[in-house]
């Protein structure tokens, strides 16, 4: 840099060309860095605002804690709340559950020592389970359907040193062999006599029936009981016992969403029939008794009930595809449902929802449908929520999968 002074205080500064180029480059670099900073800041802002916050209420023994979090799973929420879990603790919903709703209630069942008393066998197990069946499974003990298990607090001095505060006592059913009209089966019973066992198994005797040993004979392990009938022939067959389906209405998922939480499994039963044969042909068949040898497993299905709009008064006709892929033509009708409401054991009780749809006392939408395809009192999916079939109508001849939704959209009389 060259500085020259001219007369009367005037100052002239001359900057070399090389220094000027360097200063210009530095200024440009600073502008680029500042520009990148503001671009990165503006692009990051939407991702922060897009995070969904969840209100999580946690119940841990007698303690209650409420947190507001934007994490993805129940397990992450518990970590944020600084709650430590043992591998044997049980959490509902599970720690792997992804949070999509605005609020959740989380129960933590802490593992505690339970003394299991099974005859002369005593087992102490650390478990978080609450039911006898689950505790027995945790303890590695098999329970038969006829066995009885009860839970109680330990107060007795003879088990005070066990270190457990809860005791589960198992009362085993007695195994016997039953020869029932030629069908030999091993069964278990809590009854004390042969007659009591037959009543427990719902075996009804007639004047033609014979039982050995006598009805007042005490039940002993491994004993043989024989029942037979004079005259007409009997046959014994193995049949399935259909399982029931329990529906859970999930308000966090849209109508049409479906998830099987517990698969259903049919049970087994031994069924004995009395048959009447004439000229080599069976002319009648009467069920004498049915002994269930394996209980069915109830299917548990979660159904989304969050409204997608669906049928409305103004729309009038809607087409809705359920979670099984079946499309239903939906219409509505407005009649007093008191009479048909008695069809499914609700005593004629129903109410009108805020949106005008009529629902029974269990919250099911009242639906008319083809009773051959959808039997009365069966559960169906509709665009306005989970429904129950109460009624039918002439529309089913043209639309066998159609549903007529009961709604107060004509009279507006609350009925």
Image (cartoon, rainbow, N blue to C red):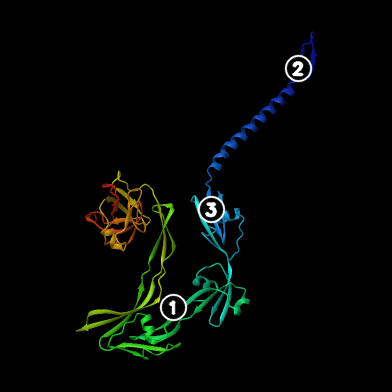
Q: Secondary structure at mark 1?
A: loop
* Earlier sequence position, callout 2 versus callout 1: 2
- Mark linked to residue 56: 3
Query: Residue at 34% of width from left, 82% of height from top?
Result: 203
Q: Is residue 145 above or below residue 261?
A: below
Which of the image's four quarters has the N terminus? top right
**Residue ID at (38%, 75%):** 268
Residue 178 quadrant: bottom left
Residue at position x 38%, y 89% in the image: 216
In this view, the residue in front, 109 or 77, is 109
Which structural element holds mark 2?
strand
43 or 52: nearer the viewer: 52
Q: Classify residue 8 as left or right of residue 174.
A: right
Which of discs 2 and 1 lies nearer the camera? The answer is 1
User: Dot 2: within a 10 Å radius of its alpha carbon, few (fewer than 14), some, or many (20 or more) residues?
Assistant: few
Residue that lies at the very extreme toward the bottom in this rendered image: 213
Q: Which residue is mark 1?
A: 146
Q: In this picture, is 201 found above or below 48?
A: below
Reading the image, the residue beneath label 2 is 14
């Amino acid at each position: 840099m060259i500085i020259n002074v001219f007369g009367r205080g005037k100052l002239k500064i001359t900057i070399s060309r090389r220094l000027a180029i360097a200063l210009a480059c530095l200024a440009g670099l600073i502008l680029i860095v500042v520009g990148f900073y503001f671009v990165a800041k503006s692009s990051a802002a939407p991702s922060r605002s897009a995070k969904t916050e969840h209100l999580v209420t946690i119940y841990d023994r007698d303690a209650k804690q409420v947190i507001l979090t934007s994490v993805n799973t129940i397990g992450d929420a518990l970590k944020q709340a600084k709650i430590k879990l043992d591998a044997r603790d049980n959490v509902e919903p599970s720690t792997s559950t992804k949070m999509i709703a605005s609020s959740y209630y989380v129960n933590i069942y802490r593992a505690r020592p339970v003394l299991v008393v099974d005859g002369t066998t005593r087992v102490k197990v650390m478990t978080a389970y609450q039911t006898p069946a689950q505790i027995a499974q945790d303890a590695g003990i098999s329970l038969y359907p006829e066995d009885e298990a009860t839970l109680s607090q330990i107060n007795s001095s003879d088990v005070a040193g066990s270190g457990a505060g809860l005791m589960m006592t198992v009362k085993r059913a007695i195994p016997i062999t039953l020869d029932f009209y030629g069908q030999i089966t091993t069964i278990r019973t809590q009854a004390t006599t042969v007659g009591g066992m037959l009543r427990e198994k719902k075996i009804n005797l007639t004047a033609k029936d014979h039982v050995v040993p006598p009805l007042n004979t005490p039940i002993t392990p491994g004993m043989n009981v024989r029942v037979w009938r004079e005259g007409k022939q009997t046959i014994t067959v193995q049949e399935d016992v259909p399982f029931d389906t329990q529906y859970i209405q999930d308000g966090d998922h849209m109508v049409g969403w479906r998830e099987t939480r517990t698969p259903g499994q049919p049970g087994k039963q031994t069924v004995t029939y009395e048959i009447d044969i004439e000229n080599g042909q069976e002319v009648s068949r009467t069920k004498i008794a049915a002994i269930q040898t394996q209980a069915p497993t109830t299917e548990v299905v979660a159904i989304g009930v969050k409204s997608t709009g669906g049928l409305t008064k103004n729309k009038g006709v809607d087409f809705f595809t359920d979670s099984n892929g079946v499309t239903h033509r939906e219409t509505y009708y407005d009649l007093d449902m008191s009479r048909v409401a008695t069809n499914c054991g609700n005593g004629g009780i129903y109410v009108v929802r805020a949106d005008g749809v009529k629902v029974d006392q269990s919250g099911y939408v009242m639906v008319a449908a083809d009773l051959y395809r959808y039997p009365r009192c069966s559960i169906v999916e509709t665009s306005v929520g989970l429904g129950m079939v109460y009624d039918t109508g002439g529309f089913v001849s043209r639309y066998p999968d159609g549903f007529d939704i009961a709604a107060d959209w004509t009279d507006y009389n609350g009925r």
